Image: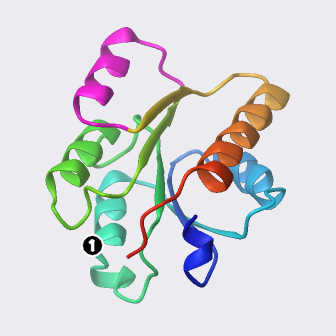
Amino acid sequence: MAEDQGGPVQILLVEDSPGDVSLTREALQSARVANELNVVGDGEAALRYLRREDEYVDSKPAHLVLLDLNLPRKSGQEVLEEIKNDPTLQHIPVIVLTTSADEEDILRSYQLHANAYVTKPVAFGDFLEALIRLEGFWLQVVHLPGE
């Protein structure tokens, strides 16, 4: 797993809802795997972060991206497409974590090579449970690529 490479798993959360950021942070703090959650609130900032540009030049490389679809400035699907078309970023697993259960969004996300698509549950407890299961799989079972 990525933490075996000398440090915590670096997770980039691309989310513009402060409430969902707080819930995600809370769920990941309970993880049994060391992780560091980095948050950006729009699609353009996500790409700058991943490319380590501008204000993110000193950021640590992401091992995993949690990506909302409904973002300002650049949609989640546009971000996903750019990540998966960029040879320096395409190895990073991207989990779409969104409120949309629309079949077109699901299909398009997988066509763009999302590694998983998770619809956010509305209820607080269900949302936390979903995130705990996600972290269990992606941070404890799967071997993530390093830099």
Which residue type does callout 1 highlight?
Answer: Arg
Instruction: Please state, as top left, top right, bottom left or bottom right, where the N terminus lies in the image.
Output: bottom right
Q: Is residue 66 left or right of residue 70?
A: right
Position above or below: 21 against 55: above
Find residue 6 and report its horizontal and vertical position in percent.
Answer: 59, 84
Find residue 97 and report its horizontal and vertical position in percent.
Answer: 52, 36
Position above or below: 92 against 114: below
Count of marks, rendered view: 1
Q: Is residue 9 visible?
A: no
Position above or below: 22 against 57: above
Find residue 20 and report its horizontal and vertical position in percent.
Answer: 66, 43
Name the residue beneath numbered marker 1: 51
- Assess whether residue 106 is covered by the magenta stretch: yes
Q: Is residue 127 left or right of residue 80?
A: right
Q: Nearer the viewer, residue 40 or 34?
A: 34
Position above or below: 75 against 51: above
Q: Is residue 32 visible?
A: yes
Q: Which residue is painted at 51% across and 31% down in the image?
A: 98
Q: Which residue is painted at 16% across and 59% down in the image?
A: 86
Q: Which residue is painted at 44% across and 82% down in the image?
A: 59
Q: Is residue 82 left or right of residue 76?
A: left
Q: Which residues are magenta?
A: 99-114
Q: Residues within 10 Å of mark 1 (few under 14, many from 20)?
A: some
Instruction: Please state, as top left, top right, bottom left or bottom right, where the C terminus lies in the image.
Output: bottom left
Find residue 61 and report its horizontal and vertical position in percent.
Answer: 42, 75
Q: Nearer the viewer, residue 129 or 76?
A: 129
- Assess whether residue 64 is covered by the magenta stretch: no
Q: Residue furthest top?
A: 103
Q: Which residue is painted at 78% across and 49% down in the image?
A: 27
